[in-house]
Image: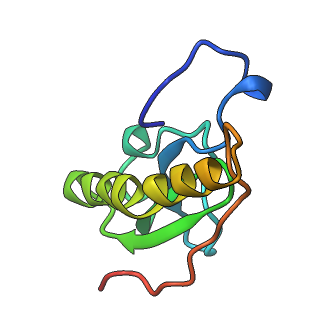
């Protein structure tokens, strides 16, 4: 995840971004998998993802793709999640999902 916490998982903010790996069958790795540390060709794409369920754009399974996924989460999802939480006067917001097509 982009920011690690020592708070028990059940008490953490549900909006923690991470780089997920897309397997050949189309499924995505979970937030416990360090996609960048897996063997080469384990994943066909990297995907920006949030622990709340939000899924961003697909990108190349290399370091630059992982950096773009992090940037997408920080630019696209994190501000929206914060704005919704503020508007609802809650410390966290409800899950949000993206409906966008990945990068070539």
Residue in the picture at 63% in, 49% down: 85
Q: Quadrant of residue 5?
A: top right
Residue in the picture at 71% in, 42% down: 90
Residue in the picture at 43% in, 69% down: 44
Q: Position of residue 6 (x, y in %)?
A: 59, 12
Residue in the picture at 40% in, 64% down: 76
**Quarter of the C terminus within the rendering:** bottom left
Q: Nearer the viewer, residue 89 or 37?
A: 89
- Callout count: 0
In the image, is 34 to the left or to the right of 26? left
Q: Quadrant of residue 97?
A: bottom right
83 to 2, vertically: above or below: below
Q: Nearer the viewer, residue 59 or 26?
A: 59
35 to 11, vertically: above or below: below
Q: Residue furthest top?
A: 6
Q: Residue furthest right?
A: 10
How has the structure been colored for display?
rainbow
Q: Position of residue 101 (x, y in %)?
A: 45, 87
Q: Position of residue 9 (x, y in %)?
A: 73, 25
Q: Position of residue 22 (x, y in %)?
A: 52, 65
9 to 29, vertically: above or below: above
In the image, is 2 to the left or to the right of 52? left
């Amino acid at each position: 995840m982009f920011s690690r916490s020592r708070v028990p998982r059940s008490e953490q903010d549900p909006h923690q971004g991470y780089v997920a790996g897309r397997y050949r069958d189309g499924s995505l790795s979970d937030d416990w998998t360090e996609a960048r540390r897996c063997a080469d060709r384990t994943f066909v794409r990297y995907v920006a993802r949030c622990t709340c369920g939000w899924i961003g754009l697909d990108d190349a399974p290399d370091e630059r793709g992982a950096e773009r996924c992090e940037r997408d989460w920080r630019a696209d999802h994190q501000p929206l999640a914060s704005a919704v939480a503020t508007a609802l006067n809650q410390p966290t917001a409800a899950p949000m999902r993206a409906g966008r097509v990945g990068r070539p």
